Image (cartoon, rainbow, N blue to C red):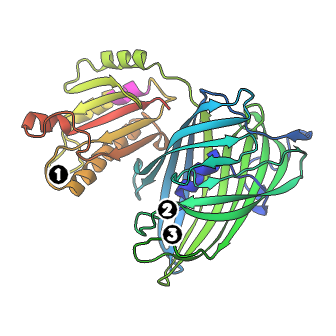
Amino acid sequence: MRRATLEAAILALSLSASPWAQAQGGPAEPAAPSAAERFAFSYVKGDRFRVLSEVEEDVYINRRYSHSAEILNRIAFGVTDAAPDGSWGLLEGSFETSERAAGASAYVISESYDSKFRRDRLGRYIIEDTYYMPVVRNVPVFPDRELKPGDEWTAPGEERHDLRRGFGIPDPYAIPFEARYRYVGTVTKDGKSLRLISASYTIFRRPPEPRAYAEIFPVQIAGFSDQKIWWDSTLGQPVSYEERFDLVFDWSDGTTIEYRGTSRSDQFEAERLDRGAVAAEVEKAVADLPNVTVAQTEEGVTIALEDLQFEPDSARLLPSELDKIARIAEILKRYPDRDILVGGHAARAGWAEGRMKLSAERARAVAERLIGLGARPPERIRAVGYGDARPIADNATEAGRARNRRVEITILEN
């Protein structure tokens, strides 16, 4: 539930004051006296950003602990249009949610979304109702006046959740709230002079019955979010974020599900990838490896390992393939600023759900190997299974099926 809220929180950035926000790590006192200033988002057409948020979440069912989740949210978005003075921007991008199993290192993508919305200088959204992301919207919304340290204000916002899977609720599920904000002051973080703004909001809602649902629907939603945001005034953008949250859903059949946890996020400006140069370099480096090809793709530069050998019906790599993965890991180390996506593909054999599951497990096995070899830390690499949805050869022949049983490792553009 909360996994996408964090993505939105950096894009959507919620800011305001709470006792928790002032008590957590980081500078507690302003680094220097802060003059009054006017806060505003600023947009430049062509700018591109990447957001990574890590979530630790505990789930309780009927007040009893059920399980914990480690979640990685990744957003890649760009400003596709903007006012000449930067007072509004049209943002388009992709939102990915990945989860890490207990004892694993690699994250596996569980949900992907696209979104498009306009945002003004104060943080207000114009977005079609069909989009599920960002989850947190109109946060922060700044007042149209100068603020000095200690100033507080409120503004309406909302969360929108995807309750299609498992609950059959077809529309983005809106939860309105009133956010409370406080400008704390100027602080030094990671060697930079930033503005610290805290935010908090509580939720208590008894929503109407949705127009459609599978078996049950929410009858009451309650919770809170306490946040702190580090704002870069020179960029007109947030650069870091922390949150503590607790959200409780009471369902029409009497079930209660609670999501309780913490999160942190960082935003990075993305530089252009010279795909042609990188593809040429990588192609030269893998020239002697069998069944390995390199291509420029929409996402970046992709290294395809065709007919990668695993034990039958398993995700255990055969020893003969380990040297090949080690060679790829050394190549990836040449581009440390780029995130990596590992995609698993299957031939059309067996049943569809099994193909999807096995392709994801094999992608995760390769990602785990790359992490272990130091190619990337866990938060900079994700795995995903495509099943047989993206064939590159004819599944009617054994040679074609061998090519389709592949793993693709992509050096991402953003």
Total marks placed: 3
Name the mark on residue 305: none
Amino acid under disc 3:
Val
Q: Nearer the viewer, residue 356 or 134?
A: 134
- In the rendered image, residue 310 lying in the magenta stretch gets the answer no
- Mark pair 2, 3: CA separation: 24 Å
The secondary structure making up most of the magenta span is helix
Residue 326 placement: quadrant: top left
Name the mark on residue 171: 2
Q: Nearer the viewer, mark 2 or mark 1?
A: 2
* Picture residue at 40% right of the left edge, 30% below the top: 298
**Residue topped by disc 3:** 59
**First to last magenta residue range:** 328-333
Amino acid under disc 2:
Asp
> In terms of secondary structure, where does tag 2 sit?
loop
**Residue topped by disc 1:** 313
- In the rendered image, residue 330 lying in the magenta stretch gets the answer yes
